[in-house]
Image (cartoon, helix red, strand yellow):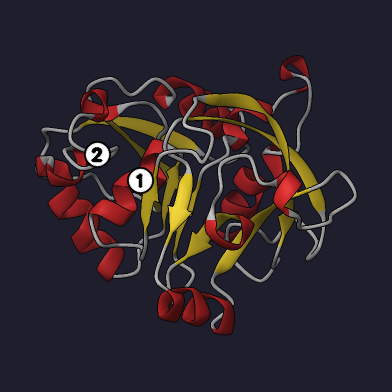
């Protein structure tokens, strides 16, 4: 499986994702600068976390119009899987590849800590190595992680099974207290309708090696490797 990691100015998790992909058996990552207008033949495109263009205007707003994003959008429309992590999730919404938008965290402060997530479905190429309902621990680090969408969009996400992860307690309770940023319905990650695009705010690449304190994030990369190899 060959994966392209898109690098924007001020990306700060691109190398982390590269390392997580490279240590996953059968995966070969390549780094692609945002000014490129073409992509190599790849099985997966990753938009990493960071603060592309310093989060000027809105988080992800400028990156969504980088030259490479026209090709990312074209590949996504043709079915190439796309993974957006944190800032990458924000870019996906700004680019129209996922519905909704992001507001500042409800507490108006940057939040950096481990959180617990409930895996809503294992029926996707991103989550097949998890169990539906499984609780995992993954780090977050963001200031605009408050996912927002209108009521009709939220209803469609629920009805179509497009919610991938929700913030929850250690025991799996989806409560306001377990929500670190005020995201609607505790949403931490969503799919597009075909489940070929996933955006999530937590950073699985930051917990994908025992040396980092845990491996709950590795199952996401293992799921992709199995599905796309």
Image point 18% across, 35% down: which residue?
57
Q: Position of residue 140 (x, y in %)?
A: 59, 32
Name the foreground residue: 31 vs 73. Answer: 73
Name the foreground residue: 193 vs 223. Answer: 193
Image point 20% across, 43% down: which residue?
61
Query: Is 16 on the left-hand or right-hand side of 149?
Result: right
Mark 2 sits on what residue?
58
- The answer to whether residue 222 shows anywhere in this view is yes
Nearer the observer: mark 1 or 2; the answer is: 2
Q: Give the image quarter of residue 23.
A: top right
- Assess disc 1: are there few (<14), some (14-19) or many (≥20) residues with their C-alpha within 10 Å of its C-alpha: many
Query: Is 208 on the left-hand or right-hand side of 94?
Result: right
SS for callout 1:
helix
Q: CA distance from mark 1 to mark 2?
A: 9 Å
Mark 1 sits on what residue?
90
Instruction: Give whichever of discs 1 and 2 has the lower sequence position.
Output: 2
Q: Position of residue 119 (x, y in %)?
A: 72, 58
Q: Give the image quarter of residue 227.
A: bottom right
Q: Give the image quarter of residue 46.
A: top left
Query: Is 213 on the left-hand or right-hand side of 45?
Result: right
Q: Are marks 1 and 2 in contact (CB under 8 Å)?
A: yes
């Amino acid at each position: 499986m060959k994966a392209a990691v898109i690098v924007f100015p001020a990306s700060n998790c691109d190398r982390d994702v590269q390392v997580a992909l490279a240590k996953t058996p059968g995966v070969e990552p390549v780094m692609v600068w945002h000014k490129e207008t073409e992509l190599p033949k790849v099985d997966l495109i990753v938009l990493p976390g960071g603060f592309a263009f310093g989060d000027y205007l809105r988080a992800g707003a400028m990156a969504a119009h980088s030259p490479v994003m026209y090709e990312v959008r074209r590949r996504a429309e043709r079915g190439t899987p796309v993974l957006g992590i944190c800032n990458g999730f924000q870019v996906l919404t700004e680019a129209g590849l996922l519905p909704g938008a992001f507001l500042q965290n409800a507490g108006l402060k940057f939040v950096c800590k481990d959180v617990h997530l409930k895996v809503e479905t294992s029926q996707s190429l991103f989550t097949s190595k998890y169990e539906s309902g499984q609780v995992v621990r993954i780090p977050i680090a963001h200031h605009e992680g408050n996912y927002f969408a209108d009521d009709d969009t939220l209803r469609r996400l629920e009805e179509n099974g497009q919610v991938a992860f929700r913030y929850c307690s250690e025991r799996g309770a989806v409560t306001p207290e377990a929500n670190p940023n005020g995201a609607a319905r505790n949403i931490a990650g969503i799919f597009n309708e075909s489940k070929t695009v996933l955006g999530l705010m937590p950073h699985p690449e930051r917990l994908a090696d025992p040396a980092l304190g845990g491996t709950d994030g590795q199952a996401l990369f293992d799921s992709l490797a199995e599905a796309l190899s």
